[in-house]
Image: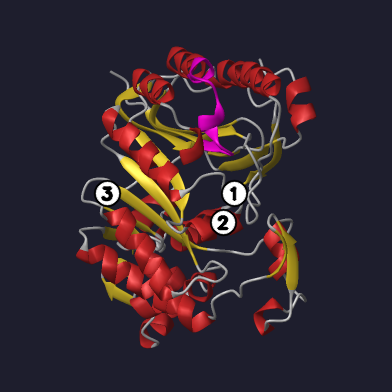
């Protein structure tokens, strides 16, 4: 039997019940009739694209957004029926759906299971209802608990919980309280990201450059009316939160396998590990990104344009096509691979690129090792704790 190339699928569902205050993802609220139009076009794209991937074996599928769990059970069932009809999906594929706790029902969960979805990613963010309200989330912590319990009852044995730290008004105590409440439930995976203030978001209007909120001088008009904005945690508090997260989660049996991701043994997210280690991935849907055979591209991000396209031909939605040079690929190997706690391997570098990693990056590696920012045990190189603290600066050193 022919050995097939490994392929990951990412499917973008752009709909959400309400845009969160911090979110800069391609997502928006829309009437339910648009869900049907979009899914019909998405299925058309799936059929068109699949003709180019007959020699590929799909090892992971990730349904992200937006809020994919807003879709009706019927639409999810149709989507996965077409995926299995068009692509060769491995029997042991990791198949994830992102879900908002305020949108899950037992009927949906049962259809997910029938559709071979075996991993649920629940977007909690915080166990503090006041923090959730300020983030613009539509759920409470109690809603999350009910959804989590339903998921277990429906048979899900691989649940990830997304958390966000460095929130306005948050301190180490409130963050640790969130960690305690979540780890008591024993999810298999926890993603713990720090809040980033991104342009184009409500938080940027409140906390962005020139606003002066860190000096305590700003007020904002948020959902509860005109109030003083809580301040963002300072840099020292942010660092304390990060280190406490690693220590606390380790004490609860979670291994950090990537800068912001923790898992019980055997439950690292295979889809994301694929991103960080250079596995080809095909993005389907509005604005979805792909990396195939050394080419990177992104689908159109305008809904009206996407719906108007004839997607029966493969790649019809693709824009901004870029062929990565050897230099591009080597850079990505280093700064994506070094996000992983196991780091990068000189042997794998040689196997992929036919180049000696030490000849290309030896001076950079030596300099960073002298500063205590990376550790080396040939052929492996990885970030130290100090290196993780300043990872953006460290990783930028690997740009050629």
- Residue 328, labelled with which disc? 2
> SS for tag 3?
loop
Q: Does 392 sit above or below residue 21?
A: below
Residue 290: image x %, image y %? Answer: 57, 38
| Residue tagged 3 | 185
Q: Is residue 332 left or right of residue 148?
A: right
Mark before the other along the chain sequence, 3 or 1: 3
Q: Is residue 184 left or right of residue 297?
A: left
Residue drawn at x 55%, y 63% as measured from the top left = 195
Q: Which SS class for mark 2? A: helix
Circle nearer the viewer, 2 or 3: 3
What is the x, y in percent for residue 188? 27, 46
Q: Which residues are magenta?
A: 64-76
At 39% from the left and 73% from the top, the residue drawn is 173
Mark 3, other Cα within 10 Å: few <14 / some 14–19 / many ≥20 = few
Secondary structure of the residue carrying tag 1 is loop
Is 204 positioned to the left or the right of 233 in the image? right
Q: Magenta segment: does it hold 69? A: yes
Asked whether the beta carbons under mark 2 and mark 1 sit within 8 Å of each other, the answer is yes
Name the quadrant of the N terminus.
top left
Do the CB atoms of the residues marked 2 and 3 lie less than 8 Å apart? Answer: no
The residue labelled by disc 1 is 324
Q: CA distance from mark 3 to mark 1?
A: 43 Å
Q: Is residue 23 above or below residue 393?
A: above
Above/below status of 327 relative to 4: below
């Amino acid at each position: 039997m022919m050995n097939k190339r490994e392929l990951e699928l990412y499917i973008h569902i752009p709909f959400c019940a309400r845009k969160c205050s911090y979110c800069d993802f391609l997502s928006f609220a829309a009437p339910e009739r648009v869900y049907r139009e979009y899914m019909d076009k998405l299925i058309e794209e799936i059929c068109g694209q699949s003709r180019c991937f007959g020699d590929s074996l799909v090892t992971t599928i990730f349904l992200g957004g937006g809020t994919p769990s807003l879709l009706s059970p019927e639409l999810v069932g149709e989507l996965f029926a077409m995926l299995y009809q068009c692509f060769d999906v491995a029997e042991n594929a990791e198949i994830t759906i992102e879900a908002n706790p305020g949108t899950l029902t037992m009927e949906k969960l049962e259809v997910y299971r029938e559709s071979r979805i075996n991993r649920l990613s629940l977007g909690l963010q915080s166990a503090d209802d006041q923090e959730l309200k300020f983030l613009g989330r539509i759920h409470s912590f109690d809603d999350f608990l009910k959804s989590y319990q339903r998921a277990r009852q429906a048979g899900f044995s691989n649940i990830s919980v997304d958390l966000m730290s460095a929130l306005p008004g948050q301190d180490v105590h409130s963050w640790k309280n969130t960690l305690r409440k979540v780890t008591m439930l024993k999810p298999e995976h926890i993603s713990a990201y720090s809040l980033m203030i991104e342009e184009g978001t409500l938080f940027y209007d409140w906390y962005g450059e020139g606003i002066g909120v860190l000096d305590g001088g700003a007020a904002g008009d948020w959902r509860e009316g005109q109030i003083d904005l809580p301040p963002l945690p300072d840099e020292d508090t942010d660092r304390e939160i990060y280190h406490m997260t690693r220590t606390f989660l380790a004490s609860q049996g979670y291994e950090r396998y990537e800068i912001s991701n923790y898992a019980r043994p055997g439950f690292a997210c295979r889809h994301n590990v694929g991103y960080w280690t250079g596995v080809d991935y095909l993005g389907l849907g509005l604005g979805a990104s792909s990396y195939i055979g050394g080419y990177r591209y992104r689908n159109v991000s305008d809904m009206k344009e996407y719906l108007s396209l004839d997607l029966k031909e493969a790649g019809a939605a693709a824009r901004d096509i870029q062929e990565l040079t050897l230099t591009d690929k080597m850079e990505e190997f280093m700064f994506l691979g070094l996000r992983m706690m196991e780091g990068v391997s000189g042997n794998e570098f040689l196997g992929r690129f036919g180049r000696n990693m030490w000849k290309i990056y030896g001076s950079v590696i030596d300099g960073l090792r002298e500063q205590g920012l990376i550790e080396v045990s040939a052929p492996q190189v990885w970030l130290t704790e100090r290196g993780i603290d300043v990872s953006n600066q460290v990783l930028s050193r690997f740009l050629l």
